[in-house]
Image (cartoon, helix red, strand yellow):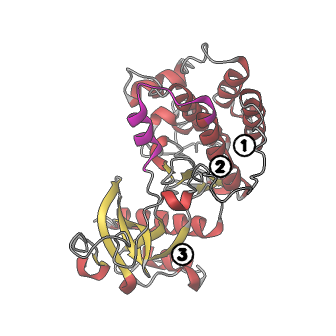
Amino acid sequence: MGSANDFLTSTEFNLDPKWLVDAKQLFVGPKIGEGAHAKVYEGKYKNQNVAIKIVHRGEIPEEIAKREARFAREVSMLSRVQHKNLVKFIGACNEPVMVIVTELLLGGTLRKYLLNTRPRSLESRVAIGFALDIARAMECLHSHGIIHRDLKPENLILTADHKTVKLADFGLAREESVTEMMTAETGTYRWMAPELYSTVTLRRGEKKHYNHKVDAYSFGIVLWELIHNKLPFEGMSNLQAAYAAAFKNVRPSAEDLPEDLALIVTSCWKEDPNARPNFSQIIQMLLHYLSMISPPEPVVPARTFSSENVVYPPESPGTSSLMFARDDTGVAPNTTVAEKPRSFFFCFNQCY
């Protein structure tokens, strides 16, 4: 039987060489996120601003093998799928440590965005626009046979202009053909489909089976949260929320929603997974609802350049102008030498 390293080599480094990161050209900056088994840093790779996810291997052999297998699976999936609403994969390496490099998004997580907006709710078109971004990302994953299993606001990142949402973190994603009984660490109970964790009815040793519809359930909870800007199952702990959803069929209230929107939300979190819509259907329902709440864009007459003295309003800034422009030193190009801070990046190899 092969070792964990044998498994990693055979799984991950079937990877096209174009995805292999040269650790010598990787520079690590401040930490911007942390999970149970990994930390995420702002960094630079070949003078490009990036996000660097460093995965901890663990201490004991069983733990090491499990994390290396998860890392290999995540890298494999990231390298196979590209979509404008998925965080762009740049590359990976497993020496001196396991590292995944992706594009750097400066808008923060959807969780942080919602918290900063409370107690106000998002404008309806904004909420539905974000929901469409998420649904399109999920449709792409499902078309490749990938189930995310951990869809929640912490794993959704905004662009710098706060106009686009991208799905990140494939650490718990699995190919649909190899799903199996889940452990307590899978996903987060508050957003998880009950069939992922409700194992009470299983006979001893029986495997837990589910399909891609677990992501539709999570999407329904996220959509409810986008509309209300409240924590779902507020006042309950994660475990209490899980128990209520699984054994009492409790869901957040959709009674105050417009009928068409309530139908989308409640259809996604139905108890029977087969009764939930797929993401192609969800996208069509969201687009139909958006068309009802969004009036047609007004026709703007063409400019007439009849006089050189006419003053026109400034152009609406595009995404690129809202991004923080930096030169190779990592500071704004118009900053004076006296204003330039010392570089906070250090060579990746200095850590190990």
Q: Which disc number belongs to residue 129? A: none
In the image, what residue occupies the spot 52% across and 39% down? 204
Which corner quadrant of the image does residue 305 belong to? bottom right
* CA–CA distance in space, label 1 to label 2: 7 Å
Residue linked to disc 3: 12
Question: Does 128 appear above or below 175?
Answer: above
The reply to whether callout 3 and callout 2 are in contact (CB within 8 Å) is no
Q: What numbered label is drawn on residue 279?
A: 1
Which quadrant would residue 50 be assigned to in this image? Answer: bottom left
Of circles 3 and 2, which is in front?
2
Please check the rendered image and state whether residue 92 is part of the magenta-colored stretch, yes or no. no
Left or right: where does residue 295 sit relative to residue 215?
A: right
- Where is residue 296 drawn, in percent x and y? 78, 35
**Badge 2 amino acid:** Met
- The earlier-in-sequence mark between 3 and 1 is 3
Q: Residue at x 56, y 17 (%)?
A: 253
Whether residue 202 is visible to the viewer of this picture, yes or no, is no
What span is in magenta?
108-125
Q: Are marks 1 and 2 in contact (CB under 8 Å)?
A: yes
Q: Secondary structure at mark 2?
A: helix
Q: Residue 310 in the image: x percent, y percent? A: 64, 52
- CA–CA distance in space, label 3 to label 2: 23 Å
Q: Which residue is mark 2?
A: 138
